[in-house]
Image (spheres, rainbow, N blue to C red):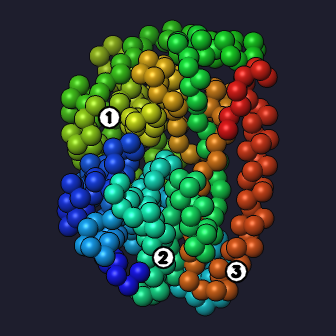
Amino acid sequence: MSDWSVSLHDGLTAIGQTAWDSCAGADNPFVSYAFLSALEDSGSVSQRTGWLPRHVTLHAPDGTLAAVCPAYLKGHSWGEYVFDQGWARAFEAAGGQYYPKLQVAVPFTPAPGPRLLCAPSAPPETAAILADALRQICGETGLSSAHVTFCEERESTLLSQRGWLPRLGVQYHWHNHGYSSFDDFLATLASRKRKVLKRERRDANAAGLTFHTLRGADITPADWQAFYTFYRNTVDRKWGSAYLTREFFPLLSERLGDRVVLMVARHGDTPVAAALNLLGDDTLYGRNWGCSGDWPFLHFELCYYRAIDFAIEHGLKRVEAGAQGEHKIQRGYVPSLTHSAHWLENTSLRSAVSAFLAEERPAIQAEADALSALSPYRKDEPGPF
């Protein structure tokens, strides 16, 4: 790649929105300039949270911008949802230094999507050259490793062909098989499962709450103030870290407009819960949720069932409800494989991790298959994959 040029940037402004989005495209909101810049400008990505932007640009031999990727220098492994802390402990116990590392990802966001963002007119070899450039960055800057997480399967395949180590994970996604209504979806479930969902929706809607789906400019500063309180409540209950600042949410709404979908439950005029979603080209992505008080089945109603309602109404192909949560299966969200790829500079560490992943991958696949057997759908309905 001697005729190609690779550069690192400590913020998106150095690249510019037009240049970035010419490579990122418009399908996935999380890799857009609007989303990533909102993280930076709100202070959510910063020294405080340990995510330091080192975005990568790749220029072709003729000087045109061929590709970009969102990348961060990290001194820890928090906020990633693909866990490598065991690798870090083993390497450091052997006298190595695992951190800092290079993370190619969307911070705090376990939503699958493209990571090697190539311009539509870029040469076909661009993604492979970018993959090699990320390895080269590690070698030239003394970083222990580079990690491309929640990437597309085709990217994981390409990276593994370039010497990276592929890794699988499991999430739960709802797929729209051309349903015309929620009842149409319910009809595909086994009778006993269908009754459970109907009861949960009935009880949630009998609690004296009203439900509102707000988008873009319809979301007021008061709505975001309430949502931030709910977000902090969830973080505090889970003993997590509040990476996202109060300023992030209204800034995101301002920059992404109608692609921000906030589902709010109110008791009278008082908001008591809300779920934040982002709208992609054919997918609704569930992100954060929180509530105050104890309301029966409110989490399921606001985060899962109303997301399905929205997807059916707008003709979306699927709903991705985020990481973890086997309870989602009984609500129609089926196991779906996620992908990542990892480059480790140290040959001994790379060999050990390669052996570990060779055992982990079939175990993850077997887990996904076993979880699929718990599907609430009738046996004559389409499978999850």
- Compared with residue 95, is residue 370 higher up or lower down, i.e. above or below? above
Q: Is residue 47 left or right of residue 316?
A: left
Local secondary structure at mark 2: helix
Question: Three-letter amino acid code at disc 3?
Answer: Ser
Instruction: Confirm or deny contact between disc 2 and disc 1 (CB under 8 A).
Output: no
> Considering only vertical position in the picture, is 178 above or below 344?
above
Q: Residue at x 60, y 51 (%)?
A: 338
Q: Amino acid at mark 1?
A: Arg
Badge 2 or badge 3: first in the primary sequence: 2
Secondary structure, mark 1, is helix
- Residue 259 is marked as 1
C-alpha gap between disc 2 and disc 3? 19 Å
Rounded to the nearest angstrom, the CA distance separating label 3 from label 1 is 43 Å
Label number found at residue 180: none
Pick the residue in front: 64 or 373. 64
| Circle on res. 351 | 3
| Closer to the eye: label 2 or 1 | 2
In the picture, the quarter occupied by the C terminus is top right
Name the residue: 53% across, 37% down.
Answer: 321
Q: How many marks?
A: 3
| Residue bearing mark 2 | 132
Q: Mark 2 or mark 1, which has the lower sequence index?
A: 2
Mark 2 vs mark 1, CA separation in Å: 34 Å
Say if mark 2 contacts mark 3, CB within 8 Å. Answer: no
Q: Quadrant of residue 190?
A: top right
